[in-house]
Amino acid sequence: EAGVAQSPRYKIIEKRQSVAFWCNPISGHATLYWYQQILGQGPKLLIQFQNNGVVDDSQLPKDRFSAERLKGVDSTLKIQPAKLEDSAVYLCASSSPGGGYEQYFGPGTRLTVT
Amino acid sequence: QKEVEQDPGPLSVPEGAIVSLNCTYSNSAFQYFMWYRQYSRKGPELLMYTYSSGNKEDGRFTAQVDKSSKYISLFIRDSQPSDSATYLCAMRRSNDYKLSFGAGTTVTVRA
């Protein structure tokens, strides 16, 4: 079974630029999550999708962050414009309806904003 | 106050030692408790999970939950250099898939 795929693995941008991350979950997983992990901290949930609908985006900074999962499969997370404090690893995870607790994480995209 | 508190360490132990990790939490609604292992530049992978209070053992790993004290632990017996990683505790409520994570404890097992 292929795992959660993410790209790019690394990205360096200047502040005020825009950036997009892509995630392809495990086949058949209806639930998809985007997390932000700042160095030295645990992952923080940004947004959760169930199929192509948003379940929870309460911690997504909506003035600069957006995410979509148009066909209920892969997803993109965008930041526009980026700030220095957005430097972090962006993790994508997915889970299946019957899987409950187990979220499978991708390798993450390490973003550096200079 | 953070919802989940975890000592970031770092923790350095010799090979074969017992590693003891713990987290405290404030939300009494948490029912599911998990430990994730995260190797450098990798995503977290689920190591152990426990529902409500009690102990669970899996090979060299033992997870304990004490809901009365809002305290969870992970023990690694006969630690190996390959156990060197960051260990994250996580927890959630019964009807909510949203995980609340601790900050992670970085463990180094010296050969």
Image (cartoon, coloured by chain):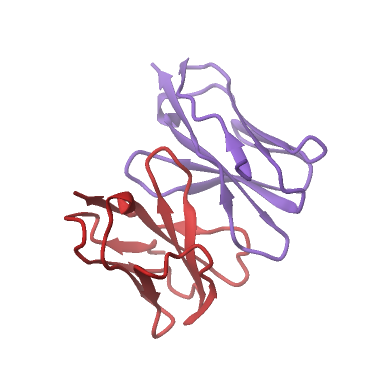
Residue at horizontal 26%, vertical 60%? A82
The residue furthest bottom is A71
Choose between A33 and B56: the one closer to the eye: A33
Number of marks in the rendered image: 0
Q: Is residue A86 left or right of residue B92?
A: left
Which image quarter is the N terminus of chain B in?
Answer: top right
- In the rendered image, the vertical position of residue B78 relative to residue A91, given as above or below: above
Name the image quarter holding residue A77. Answer: bottom left
Residue at horizontal 34%, vertical 68%? A64
Which image quarter is the C terminus of chain B in?
Answer: top left
- In the rendered image, the vertical position of residue A61 relative to residue A107, given as above or below: below
- In the rendered image, the vertical position of residue B109 relative to residue A22, given as above or below: above
Residue at horizontal 40%, vertical 79%? A69
Q: Colour of chain A?
A: red
**What chain is the purple one?**
B
**Residue B72 % position (x, y):** 69, 36
Residue at horizontal 72%, vertical 48%? B27
**Residue A4 % position (x, y):** 38, 62
**Residue B11 % position (x, y):** 48, 21
Q: Let me know if residue A77 appears in the view.
A: yes
The residue furthest right is B68
**Residue B49 % position (x, y):** 64, 47
Q: Let me know if residue A107 appears in the view.
A: no
Choose between B46 and A86: the one closer to the eye: A86
Name the image quarter holding residue A105. Answer: bottom left
